[in-house]
Image (cartoon, rainbow, N blue to C red):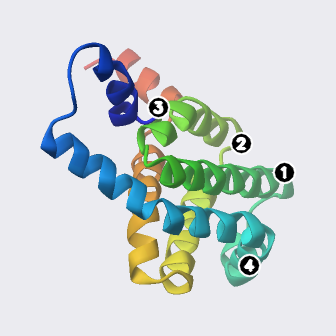
Amino acid sequence: MNEFLSQLFQSPEKRYLSQQELGVLSKMVSSLPERIKIYRYLRDQEVKLVQALVNQLSPELAKTEAPALEQAVKSIVLVLRYAAMAMLTNDTQLVQCRLENWLPAMMEAHQNQAVVQALHRGLTQALSKTLSAKQFALLRPSLDQVQSLLATRPQAERITELLEPV
């Protein structure tokens, strides 16, 4: 759950909300209809968006073995779903919590980090063109959070680096 909302639910026992807290809550509630609209769009267009992305990147992806490509596409679908849910709930930490261990481990296991990164870049570009600037601004923090996870070096590289003599 959104950390801010979680803290608000604890507040009635202690105090009334401050003017600033009410302002943040009001902003969150007023943007909810737009967030729901974006979420529905992403849900309904997921297959088309991902298929168009794969078609667009076909030359770049042609060198990738089928199992690694299949897993990269599955990963990007999950990335889109978590980004959509994080945007809907206004909780970018959701992306971090749900994907931080799983996504880097999957990329390492399938040796497809470059492919997942290319798919993520393409997805971000496609969404920036498909959604309005205001809509994309709501989704962007979640996509940026994913980008930071994609930039994480695989665990095996970090362990190998630590074990190498200086």
Label located before the other in sequence (2 or 3): 2
Can residue 62 be seen in this snapshot? Answer: no
Q: Which residue is the site of mark 4?
A: 58
CA distance for labels 2 and 1: 8 Å
From the viewer's side, name the closer residue of 65 and 126.
126
Q: Where, quadrant-wise, is the C terminus in this rendering?
A: top left
Q: Residue at x 56, y 79 (%)?
A: 126
The amino acid at mark 1 is: Pro
Can residue 11 be seen in this snapshot? Answer: yes
Q: Which residue is the site of mark 3?
A: 157
Q: Which residue is the site of mark 2?
A: 110
The amino acid at mark 2 is: His
Q: Secondary structure at mark 4?
A: helix
Q: Secondary structure at mark 3?
A: helix
CA distance for labels 3 and 4: 28 Å
Q: Which class describes the residues within 10 Å of circle 3: few (<14), some (14-19), or many (20+)?
A: few
